[in-house]
Image: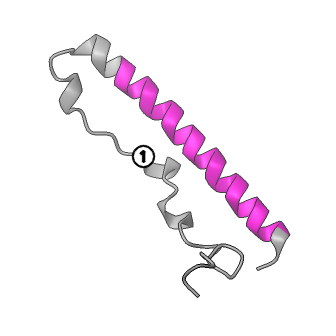
Amino acid sequence: MDQKDKRQLRRLKRDIKRTGNKRRRQVLKRDLTDSPEDAPHAEFDFGRSSSATLNGLDEDATRKDRKRS
């Protein structure tokens, strides 16, 4: 994987995480105003805004801890 691809993947993951966080904050605020007693127990589903599928895609020599070698 070359540097350009890695940079694009990292940018994509950063954008997805930002989108998910923004949406999560909006939903939690809405839950807090609608039903304050149930707000601490609310669950959130990131859905398309999940970055879990992008984890570990750029595992190569440039990202590994050099002390372990």
Where, quadrant-wise, is the C terminus in this rendering?
Answer: bottom right
| Residue that appears at 21% across and 15% down | 35
User: How many numbered discs, if any?
Assistant: 1
- The amino acid sitting under disc 1 is Phe
Where, quadrant-wise, is the N terminus in this rendering?
Answer: bottom right
Q: Is residue 65 magenta?
A: no
2 relative to 13 in the view: left or right: right
Q: Is residue 15 magenta?
A: yes
Residue 58, image x, y percentages: 65, 73
Q: Nearer the viewer, residue 69 or 12?
A: 69
Q: Can you identify the residue that label 1 sits on?
A: 46
Q: Establish if 45 lies above or below 57.
A: above
| Residue that appears at 18% across and 32% down | 41
Residue 2, image x, y percentages: 82, 77
Q: Secondary structure at mark 1?
A: loop
Residue 45 is drawn in which quadrant? Answer: top left
